[in-house]
Image (cartoon, rainbow, N blue to C red):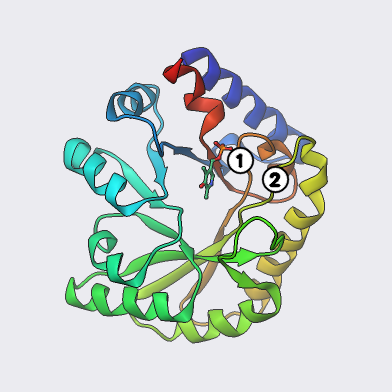
Amino acid sequence: MEKRLQEIEQRIEKACNKIGKQRDEITLVAVSKTYSVEHIQKVMQKGVENFGENRVQELICKQEVLESQVKWHLIGHLQTNKVKYVVGTVDLIQSVDSIKLAEEIQNQSIKKECVTKILIQVNIAQELTKYGFIKKDVIEAVKKIAKLSNVKIEGLMMIAPYVENAEENRSIFKELYKLSVDIQKQKIDNVSMRFLSMGMSNDFEVAIEEGANMIRIGTAIFEQLNN
Ligand SMILES: *Cc1c(COP(=O)(O)O)cnc(C)c1O
C-alpha cells in the first residue's frame, strides 16, 4: 500500500509538472468505500487527510470509529431524508444533483447553525449515472442554490465513464473545466469555483492536465489491501 501511494504521488506530481502546477494545488481524496477502518487508518498514517464515501450508512459507521480525524467527502447520491445525518459531519458534499437536495441541505444547515460546503454534480457523459445536472441546466441551478444562505457552492464534480484509455475522457474533462470557467466569469454571489473534482484511478492524470484540482482515487490506493 505504501508503495502504491508513493506511485500515485509520483504520477500526480508528473502530471502537475506537465502543466506547471504545484503538487499542493491538487487535493487527493482517497475513496474508502467498501474498505475497512483499519485500511483507512493505514492510509491516514501516510498523510492522506481527505476520504470519500458514497453511502451514508457506511460513512456514519466509519465516523463513529474515526471521529473527527478525517475530512470526509460525500461523493455518492444523497437522498433528502438522509441529509440530516451528513450536515455538520462532512467537510464537503460533492454530489449535489438537484435543487431539492440543496434546499434540504439548507434546512438542516440552519438547524445545526452551520454552513455546508457543496459541489454541483454535473452529468456530462450521461451514460454512466442518472445523477447530476445536465450541462445546460447547471448555470441556472447554481444561481438558485447560490441564494441559499447556509449552502456554499465551492465548485463542480463529475463522474466520468470508466474507460480503459484515459484519453477517451479528455474531451469531457475539458468540457467541465470550461463550464467552471464560464461560471467563475459570471461572479455570482456566494459561489466559488475553487474545486474541480474529476479524475479517478484510471484517468486522474488526464483529469489533472485538463484542470482538475481534486481527484478521487479508490482502487489504485486500496485494492491490494483486500488481497
Ligand atoms: C468509487 C468512486 C471513485 C473512485 O473510483 P476508483 O476507480 O476506485 O478510483 C471516485 N468517485 C466516485 C463518485 C466513486 O463512487
Q: Disc 1 residue type?
A: Met
In-front residue for pair 186/44: 44
Left or right: residue 13 versus residue 57 is right
Q: Mark 2 touching mark 1, by CB under 8 A?
A: yes
Left or right: residue 74 versus residue 13 is left
Q: Position of residue 79 (x, y in %)?
A: 37, 67
Q: Disc 2 residue type?
A: Ala
Q: Position of residue 64 (x, y in %)?
A: 17, 42
As drawn, 167 above or below 158: above
- Specify the label residue 207 is tagged with: 2
Callout 2: CB less than 8 Å from ligand 1: no
- Residue at 46% x, 78% y is 190
Q: Position of residue 119 (x, y in %)?
A: 49, 64
Within-10-Å neighbours for mark 2: few <14, some 14–19, many 20+: many
Q: Which residue is mark 1?
A: 200
Within-10-Å neighbours for mark 1: few <14, some 14–19, many 20+: many
As drawn, 59 above or below 32: below
- Residue at 41% x, 31% y is 48
In-front residue for pair 83/127: 127
Question: Which element carries disc 2, helix, strand or loop?
Answer: helix
Question: CA gap, disc 2 to disc 1?
Answer: 8 Å
- Residue at 63% x, 31% y is 12
Q: Earlier in the sequence, mark 2 or mark 1?
A: 1
Image depth: mark 2 or mark 1 in front: 1
Q: Name the image quarter holding residue 25.
A: top right
Displayed-image quarter of ligand 1: top right
Question: Which element carries disc 1, helix, strand or loop?
Answer: loop
Callout 1: CB less than 8 Å from ligand 1: yes
- Residue at 46% x, 53% y is 75
